[in-house]
Amino acid sequence: MIAEQKIEKTIINIAPQMNDGNHGLHYEENLLWEKERCDHSGVDLPKPDGTALRTGQSARGSIGLPQVSEPQVVRHFVRLSTWNYSIDHGFFPLGSCTMKHNPRLNEKMARLPGFAHVHPLQPESTVQGALRVMYELQNWLAELTRLPGVCLTPAAGAHGELAGMMTIRRAHEAKGQGHRKIVLVPDSAHGTNPATAVICGYTTKTIKTSETGRLTIDAFKEALGNGDDIAGMMVTNPNTCGLFESDIHEIARLLHEAGGYFYCDGANFNALVGKIRPGDFGVDVMHINLHKTFSTPHGGGGPGSGPICVTEELAPYMPVPVVVKNEDTFHLAYEDERPETLGRLRGFVGQFGMHVRALAYMMSHGADGLKQVSEDAVLNANYLLSQLKDVYHVPYKGTCMHECLLTDKIQKEKGVSTLDIAKALCEHGYHPMTTYFPLVLPGTMLIEPTETESKDAIDRFVIVMRSIAEDVAKGDTEKFHHYPVSTPRKRMNEVQAARHPKLRWKENS
């Protein structure tokens, strides 16, 4: 009874803040060109008469910049910035791509002059501190994964996948096994997995997941066949349903017996870090999203970083450069020192700023702190699942890992879809969760609360999600087809916008 009173009191205190109807500071903003007046300009410079162009090109006419004053420019971009929903605004329930708070300390470290102003063409003797950072990061990643070979070069997760699968291909070719051309991929995989395999010259074969949302040994054996033409498999663990692959150790053993390699998509590593090492359940290669698991602001398309970790057997074949230590100095090892390497995948050494942030994150947490990171991520997801499973359809029984999966099955019976629920969240001031992924079920909603959210923040989100479900259950559904109504841009025809985008502003268009 006391617990019920506390929950009721919480709802009374929180709910008015999410539906206060105050939209007075929600700015509308048109384009700078629409503000243009011929007698307003931000700067007035004399015409450069008699000055020849040093490029040898002909002089340009007008470049088409809007003629506006400085206050107009400043207000324009400040108002646009208020449209951006960020982790500093509030909770991101965006499963499969961690949107979490990243400690400001890590940003400060990345901005130290010796790191921020370093140049990749400097002599190695002048960048020993930077090389040591990379060397230490390699050691941390090797220890956390139990995969001793580490290459920091890949620029993002999908690039890491490419590096990993190219390493596998190089190893097979070196052993005279180039005829192996099939890669096994679960039907719940990230879309980049089969795409990467195909780019590397492989054909993919789908492994069907069971009604439990996981791979089964029987389904794997059926896909494996005699194994003579299998190059490897690409599996995310925990998988995209937010579940740990309970049979993965036996599946990895069967794959290895057949001569294939186990590529693990490390996108969900933040559910495992400090708890279990992927090498312990048979992984040969994996990429790690530093920008997801180990701290980098992951928004606006980057920057990313996707190092790969590989077994001792595969280490000679992975890309270059890698950082090596000779007594008290560090240097980059290239093809001349690693003759079996597949070569370079990009210029220089990868996203160095991400390396600094990741190492700062690891060192500030320590081994016990990283373990708690994964424990908190899993705890938060299961708490959220426990609060929503009575009003939304939960397709798989039991607990989840760091993200929980719901579907719109209950709400769809009243005519409200996953898209409607996502738009309702926008109306309530939340960025939607990942929708319609994974594709193994219809109407999916993948929610990842991350390890950095407080119980209070998750409770507020739960209240909104429950209020949506309650309105649908009562039959108050028409409004869901019009949400959002309070945002600067209302509900759009997303299909038409995707197929016929207008990418350039034209006056009077």
Image (cartoon, helix red, strand yellow):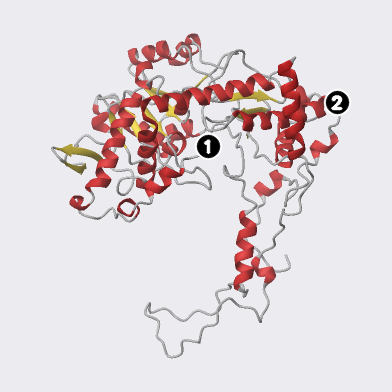
Q: State the residue lying farthest toward the top.
A: 218
* Disc 1 from disc 2: Cα separation: 34 Å
Task: Give the image location of residue 194, x and y in percent.
Answer: 48, 31
Q: Residue at x 65, y 58 (%)?
A: 79
Q: Check disc 1 and report its element: helix, strand or loop.
A: loop
Q: Which residue is mark 1?
A: 100
Q: Quadrant of residue 472?
A: top right
- Placement of the N terminus among the 4 image quadrants: top right
Q: Is residue 41 above or below residue 241?
A: below
Q: Is residue 399 left or right of residue 470?
A: left
Q: State the residue lying farthest toward the bottom.
A: 50
Whether tag 1 and tag 2 are in contact, CB under 8 A, the answer is no
Badge 1, how many Cα within 10 Å: few under 14, some, many 20+? Answer: many
Select label 1 or label 2 by which is in front: 1
Q: Is residue 175 left or right of residue 235?
A: left
Badge 2, how many Cα within 10 Å: few under 14, some, many 20+? Answer: few
Q: Which residue is mark 2?
A: 474
Mark 2: amino acid: Lys
Q: Is residue 157 left or right of residue 65?
A: left
Viewer-side residue, 382 vs 317: 382
